[in-house]
Amino acid sequence: MKRKAVSKKKTVVLRKQAPRAGSTRTTGASTSAASHEPAFREIVTLIQQARQQAFRAVNVELIDLYWGVGERINQRIASDGWGKSTIVSLAAFIRRRDPNARGFSAQNLWRMRQFYETWRSEKKLSPLVRELSWTNNLLILGKCKRSAEREFYLRLAVREHWVKRQLERQIDSALFERVALSPPKLSPVVRVLHPQAAEVLKDSYLVEFLQLSGVHSEGDLHRGLLQYLKDFLIELGRDFCFVGSEYPIQVGGQDFALDLLFFNRALNCLIAFELKITRFEPEHLGKMAFYLEALDRDVKKPHERPSIGVLLCATKDDEVVEYALSRSVSPALIAEYQTRLPDKKLLQRKLHEFYQLALPASEAPKAKRRKGRKP
């Protein structure tokens, strides 16, 4: 008689395992971290601020060192007739005596002397050079020929905290020439309400980073500015904060959309941008005035100043702009955008001609007085 095989079923007992040493409960840890996040952020902010202050202190010491070296070289050139061969020998001597020293090549030593020579008589500006990196100082020295141009980029670079790439782009795009030849044209209302607006806003904005084709739509321009918003904010200026795109405005029973809305901390007001891929037309001001009225009534905070509107057009006729703004009661200005880098040499020639024409104009009143005298 065969025995039947009896299968024994194994009973599996799932036991709750004790947590391993060093492990923590994820849920509890994340909940605890979330509750302490404000305090954690304060500590991170302290670390970042201390790091920035350390970088700034090191940079000031470095610029002071280069200033001192440049001053002594300049004195030796004047007293002992040091020349290029002597500076080459000095660079070799520094390498032998202090092999770890960096940045003291013969070429850089000459730059230190040029740095000192350029700024030593500018008592109001010399403190500002210590707020810029040596790289940015060299950019301004090497690319800017006029003292007014150097001062312009020095002040802006300090105010906007430009890194090398940003400063180089602004110099290459002839920002100084563009501002000098075409200051922003503001309506009388803007000048009264915002006296500093001319220092914040521009007559033209360079958006070559969008890489727009010759024929493009307002949608292409709008999408490009949103995609490269960081670059556009740099072009606008440091105190601009982005509020929204196609910002909804409701008046009565109708809905409207403002192309781009920003807030400027320096002016303490909202700044609305309307995009036009065509030439400026006077009727554009009417719609902008409507938007600004709606912003001031329904969006502006009580402590904020009246809003400003910027019509960003493909082109504009300056005489038409002057006529349109002369009696406008709307705090607006008309600017144009450029999709290609301007011809810097052409702008430099125009600026030179502008300076030459300005000289006789300043002496004209004297000439008229002499001509009007009786013999």
Image (cartoon, grey):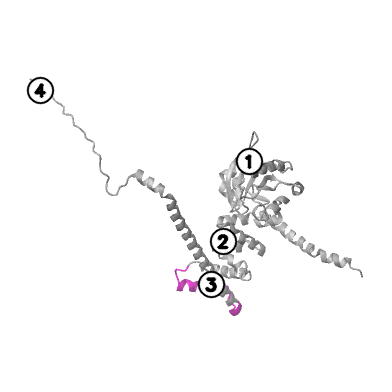
State the residue in front, 190 or 160.
Answer: 190
Q: Position of residue 182 (x, y in %)?
A: 71, 54
Are the residues tagged 1 and 4 within 8 Å (C-beta)?
A: no
- Given the image, on which type of amino acid does mark 3 rest? Val
Residue ID for mark 2? 136
Quadrant for the C terminus in the image:
bottom right
Q: Is residue 238 magenta?
A: no
Question: Marks 3/4: CA distance?
Answer: 106 Å
Q: Residue furthest top?
A: 1
- Residue 79 among magenta residues: yes
How far apart marks 1 and 2 lie (CA) works out to 38 Å
Q: Is residue 216 left or right of residue 92?
A: right
Q: CA distance from mark 2 to mark 3?
A: 24 Å
Mark in the foreground, 1 or 3: 1
Q: Which residue is mark 4?
A: 3
Q: Nearer the viewer, mark 1 or mark 4?
A: 1
- As rendered, which of 4 and 257 lies closer to the eye? 257
Sequence-wise, the earlier of marks 3 and 4 is: 4
Q: Amino acid at mark 4?
A: Arg
Q: Earlier in the sequence, mark 2 or mark 3?
A: 3
Q: In the picture, which quadrant includes the N terminus?
A: top left
The three-letter code of the residue at mark 1 reads Leu
Q: Which mark is residue 258?
A: 1
Residue at point 88%, 66% (across, down)? 371
Pointers 2 and 3 in contact (C-beta within 8 Å): no
The residue that disc 3 covers is 88
What main secondary structure does the magenta stretch of the protein show?
Answer: helix
Q: Say few, some or many: other residues with alpha carbon within 10 Å of mark 1 (under 14 / 14 to 19 / 20 or more).
A: some
Which residue occupies 73% across, 41% down?
283
- Residue 77: image quadrant is bottom right
